[in-house]
Image (cartoon, grey):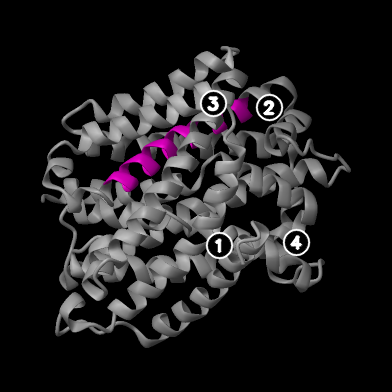
Amino acid sequence: MNGKAKSGALLGAAFLMATSAIGPGFLTQTAKFTGDFQASFGFVILISVILSAIAQLNIWRVLCVSGMRGQDVGNRLLPGLGYFISFLIVLGGLVFNIGNVGGGALGIQTTLGIPVQISYFIAGGLAVLVFLSKDAKGIMDKLVKILGGIMIVVILVVIFIVKPPVATAVKNSFVPDAKLGTLVPAILTLLGGTVGGYITFAGAHRLIDAGVTGEGKLKDIQYSAVMGMIVAAIVRILLFLAVLGVVVKGVTLDAGNPAADAFFQGAGEIGRRFSGLVLTCAAITSIIGAAYTSVSFLKTFSSKIAEKENLWTIAFIVISTLVMAFLGKPATLLVLAGALNGLILPVTLGVCLVASQNKKIVGENYKHPKLLLILGIVVVVLAAYVGIRSLSALKLF
């Protein structure tokens, strides 16, 4: 791989991970919590970014050093574990992709005024176009960077319009006015939303596909992982500032769509259109990321899936689109997928932490940093707590 191709793959993997995290739920979550905690939400972002980085670095290092995808590492540790992980990720990815299609449709409707029933097919169709090409992965790398850049620029414009209290936000990011106990649930929610489910695997699997594997590529692997976290954090921080500039003026956001309402209240009709554009970009990149990553969990189980990877990815998107278009909002499925998603991070991160100590997986010479291992265990405990709470909400425990 030449220097330009390698650089493209590293940044592509970083943006794929970041934009997979930045979906419709990410936007709603950020706006809602900013309305709830105002400037103190900066502290929530800071802690969740640190915890997410710990999870991301542990998982990316183990997968990319070993050259094995998440399901293969699971099966190597315990036969059948990889199939269980794949089931959780593909189910969660499919259901959340249905929601991503719905979010994309709402974004297109808000931006262009196209009826939502038609917009479902436009959102799904735009994602399908990527995988019709033989160079689907190359196009995917470029597209997620372009759409990620558009989101950042649009949110920056809104920030200049609403003029948020940046100094107050910075101060509260380190010394919050709100009580720490009230911020903990939001921190744990953001942790799952940033690296839960398929999201944490999106970039690592992309690097494996690009051949960026082995201990000798550790610098490249860590660079890509950190870049992904930085991009996701930048979008979260900018969105936080844009919404903060509105809520500090005493505006109560519409609970049904707090992000769009914040843009409208802060910048009028152009703000509403901007919110639609951001939602569209966020949804399409998340559709692409969820479909690509979910299929990557299936392709090592069958050579036929690997040979027809693009067709399987297209089928995944088409099914998501048809379910959204004909069955409407899958509320029950989304609740169930949310609970399953809560279980995925502690399972997958726990598996990777165990694998990091297994020489048959990472090689005889690889030494996983002890501090990263210990911090990873802390994140597993926190994530497991979130998962149990999610299941308790469904009365499964």
The residue at the point 44 percent across, 26 percent down is: 321
Q: Image quadrant of residue 82?
A: bottom left
- Numbered disc in front, either 4 or 1: 1
Crowd class of label 4 (few under 14; some 14 to 19; many from 20; radius 10 Å): many
Residue 34 position, x and y percent, is: 73, 51
Q: Which-is-in-front pick, marks 2 and 3? A: 3
**Residue 284 within the segment the image draws in magenta:** yes
Residue under numbered circle 2: 271
Highlighted magenta segment, given as a residue range? 274-295
Quarter assignment of residue 289? top left
Residue at (75% x, 24% y) in the render: 268
Q: Secondary structure at mark 1?
A: helix
What amino acid does circle 2 point to? Gly
x then y, percent, for residue 30: 65, 49
Asked if residue 298 lies left or right of residue 127, the reply is left
Is 250 or 210 nearer to us in this picture?
A: 210
Q: Nearer the viewer, residue 378 or 271?
A: 378
The residue indicated by pointer 1 is 191
Q: Secondary structure at mark 4?
A: helix
Q: Which residue is mark 3?
A: 327
> Which residue type does callout 1 highlight?
Leu
Judged by depth in the image, the label closer to the viewer, 2 or 1, is 1
> What residue would you read off at disc 4?
40
